[in-house]
Image (cartoon, rainbow, N blue to C red):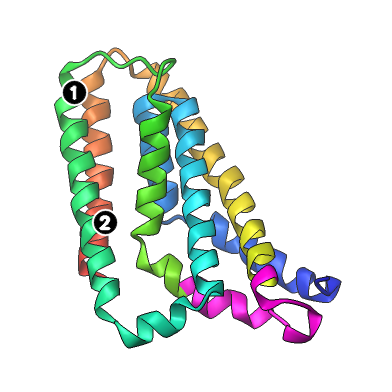
Amino acid sequence: MIDPVVLLAFIPAALALNATPGPDMMLCLAQGLHNGRRAAWRASAGVSTGAMVHVTLAGLGLGALMNAVPQAFDIIRWIGVGYLLYLAVQALRSRRTRLDPAAPRPARAFRAGLFTNLSNIKVIWFVLAFIPQFVDPAAGPVFAQFLAFGAMIAAGGFVVNGAVGASAGRWGRALTRNSGVLGTVTAIIYTALALRLAVME
């Protein structure tokens, strides 16, 4: 049982996190702009699933593993850079294809959201630095509390990121006659995310 007072402190902080633009939100924006509302919501679902993976690993002792093998962060980061650049190239290649936002590729959008979140080391750091502040060993199993707090963050992120991407989907439908613009804008977003991840300390 989580103390209601703790929830009053946790929920506003979690909402502030979800409302702050970052790689996950930008990914959902790109998916919505390029493929439409359904793809945006599925990308957001992938992001939230990745967030729960981070929370689960943190609860199982990821912090100890990362302290013992710090190179793991670099491996995760560079895999993420490569994948984002791959998405940028794919977006550029799609410029000659007429877009159909009403029929996105939901499975691909979900995978993109999942992989992007899992490769974002800032999420790992956030989970390890933020959630333990609200965990009380006297209140019950620590792992269960990790999952509960993580589920709140993931749920809030799903709504916020999905809504942002769905709004972008409306713009995408209005621009379907110019798929070159959509492909270029989407490629720029993916490339910016890759560069940001590459230079991150």
> How far apart are the alpha carbons under marks 1 and 2?
23 Å
Q: What percent of the width, then of the height, locates residue 165?
A: 47, 36
At a point 36% along the width and 38% down the height, the residue shown is: 30
Q: Element type at marker 1?
A: helix
Q: Which mark is residue 34?
A: none
Label 1, on which residue? 95
Tell me which secondary structure the magenta stretch mostly adopts. Answer: helix
At a point 18% along the width and 43% down the height, the residue shown is: 86
Q: Which mark is residue 80?
A: 2
Q: What percent of the width, then of the height, locates residue 112?
A: 35, 42
35 relative to 148, above or below:
above
Q: In screen coordinates, is 103 left or right of 133?
A: left
At a point 24% along the width and 52% down the height, the residue shown is: 192
- Does label 1 or label 2 sit earlier along the sequence? 2
Q: In screen coordinates, is 93 left or right of 129?
A: left
Q: What percent of the width, then of the height, locates residue 72?
A: 28, 74
Q: Element type at marker 2?
A: helix
Task: Give the residue type at disc 1.
Answer: Arg
The residues colored magenta run 126-144
